[in-house]
Amino acid sequence: MIYLPPIMGLVLFICLLGITCKSPKENNNFPTIPFNYPTTEVDTITDQYFGKQLSDPYRWLEDDRSDKTADWVDRQNKLTFSYLDQIPFRNKLKERLTKLMNYEKMTSPVKEKNFYYFFKNNGLQNQDVYYRCRHLDSVPELLIDPNTFSEGGTSSISGMAVSKDEKYLAFQVSVAGSDWNKILVMDLEEKKLLPDTVHWVKFSIISWDRQGFYYSRYPQPNGSALSDKNEFHSVWHHKIGSPQESDKLIYEDKKNPLRNVFATVTEDQRFLCLSISESTSGNALLVKDLLKPNSDWIWIVKTLGEDFNVIGSHDDHLFVHTNSNAPFWQLLAININQTAQNHWKIIIPESSDVLNEVGVMNHKLVANYMRNASSLVRIFDLSGAFQHELKLPEIGTVDGFSGKKDQVEAMYGFSSFKRPYSIYKVNLDNYESSAHFIPKTLHNPEDYITEQHWFQSKDGSRIPMFLTFKKGLQKNGETPSLLYGYGGFNVPITPWFNPLRIALIEQGGIFAVANIRGGGEFGKKWHLAGTKERKQNVFDDFIAAADFLVKENYTTREKLAIEGRSNGGLLIGACITQKPDICKVAFPGVGVLDMLRYHKFTIGWAWASDYGTSDSKEEFDYLLKYSPLHNCKESQYPATLITTADHDDRVVPAHSFKFAAALQKAQKGSNPVMIRIDVSAGHGGGKPTSKRIDEASDLLSFMFYQMNITPKL
């Protein structure tokens, strides 16, 4: 599944902390860094698609275990890093980015029975460290430091759950950014790891009952663990103190290998809920009453077209967050004894704002909405009667809301494009909020501003875009600007803080985020408007966003960079192959770039609900029209730095390998086309701080150099 799963301003005088920069209008006339593309072997492989013959000359790069592919990767990396090494300000820029990243961070504490649990980072630790404390103001007690798992911090914690009695902690460990995990178990009283270890876990939740925990896994792969197709997901139960071989199979579907299944137990430990899906949206739902021994499964929903998420229970009712008959989502109560649809009761009805998520806390419903792609929090009683609306600091994003059904106090996190992730606690009796943790950063958030603008896409649709910059920006048409987009899988791109963007702001830049169709910013219809045969809307929206920045005199094509990751990498690849003059610099990151074969690797088949597949003639026809790999024609392309990683087993690096080879061959201009292949890293989750800084330094220095901008550091 693609998840994904991430201010800028014009500085014409003294910048933050005395840093100055040259005016963006100044042309430094940087010397051209010489380079020669490594030779890439061309194969003669062809495929037949509905009577159409297509060559696939770089198919051999799909073999992630071959020496020939490894040699190609080595030669491409040598070219890229030898080029980056010659950018004179790259090391100084890295020093600045390191300082900007060096501030204390923590996640919103989650209260269990007696303790609060949270992650914390002192600033530059490669991985966040897991702690607990009995009281919010007490000294935290270290539980797990993943920085000790591997050299360079390349192993990370990707999920965890504390047992209801607080005796055990089960946690998932990912190595080198892979989606494959193993589950380890800690005795919380002794602070020691138990022998219990569960392997071949992927796309899983850990959910405890009174004897152990439920988890999801695939069979052990027979070929390459990093690229083989993932099939036959299943749910198991692990009993503490027993080997994995003794785990009990809870659910599998031998007739439908391309289905994923996830298990959760409700907070009261009464109901075991299974969510079954074939894609990144839509799921069936079945439930078992754990209080009734040997009870049968109860099917709540058997179809896979709409989303049904159980968020809690009350007496015999399940609270279900759904977009069924509600494109902007609603909350239902479903009686476990009367599950027919005509008995479903609407608790929080659909409104003009997207109901993003709901939690049951203090016997109330805490509803986190999106309005124009930013957060709005409303609180209701269990019958759905409105109680209160939280006041938030500014346009931003609320997440990490945590609390229990019988706890008065709840915690939540808030961030924006200019404000780092901060933690607040709220009393759900009187609704008084207070700050628990406000990090101290080098920049002053009050010096920055975020504006939301609306522009018109090709078909007349109105699309919003956030612009963040330092106060006092003058629209002179020369501001270095970075435009970011995603546009897929119902994923909303809401305001978030990234300290690595601050370096761009300090140099007089704008950070822009276009909330294009395909995402979840405006509900199900907005998402569907950017899927399958409508996917071109996504690219048209983003191209229109770039046009808006130029037309409104914020920047020029020569001072514009575009960036996207994963599905957003597809976005960037499609935009530069459709409109090569869209920008000066392009960053397609870990992108889906071969649209005819994406579904043949790992979990790629699950993306067919957004893309379609080349197995269907109708879908093949529109996929071929925009597939970046298949539309690399001779042209003058932007300076392009493609990024991927050797352990990306979600969007396999072969996408980026093949696209880089094709684009290098097609490039007729003088702009470099290069690929940066990270080692011991994956799709992005769990990437060590040091690697994040390295990558940001390389991308930003590449961008500045292509734009003839010298940062003053």
Image (cartoon, grey):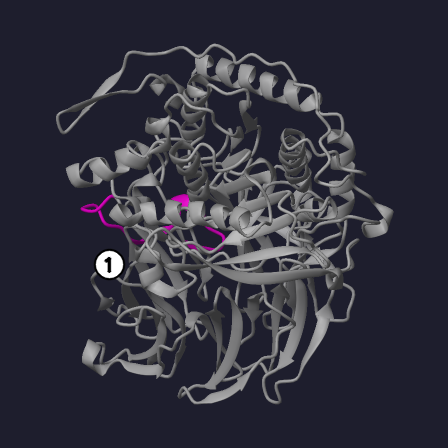
Q: Position of residue 484 (x, y in %)?
A: 53, 47
Residue 119 image-quadrant placement: bottom right
Which residue is at a point 73% across and 30% down the rendered structure image?
Answer: 90
For the point 47% across and 10% down, which residue is it?
Answer: 39
How far across and how far down the image is residue 622, in percent? 24, 39
Quadrant of res 344: bottom left
Q: Does any portion of residue 172 appear in the rendered image? A: no
Q: Which of 597/340 is in front?
A: 597
Q: Give the percent coordinates (x, y) of residue 132.
A: 68, 62
Q: Which residues are magenta?
A: 238-257
- Residue 174 at what x, y percent from top left? 53, 41
Confirm whether residue 303 shows in the render.
yes
Q: Residues within 10 Å of mark 1 (few under 14, many from 20)?
A: some
Image point (68%, 59%), residue name = 420
Quadrant where the C terminus sits is: top right
Kindly identify the amino acid type of the residue bearing the numbered disc 1: Leu
| Residue 690 to residue 466: above or below | above
User: How many numbered marks does the figure carry?
Assistant: 1
Residue found farthest to the right: 18
Whether residue 388 sits left or right of residue 666 in the image: it is right
Identity of the residue drawn at 30% across and 74% down:
292
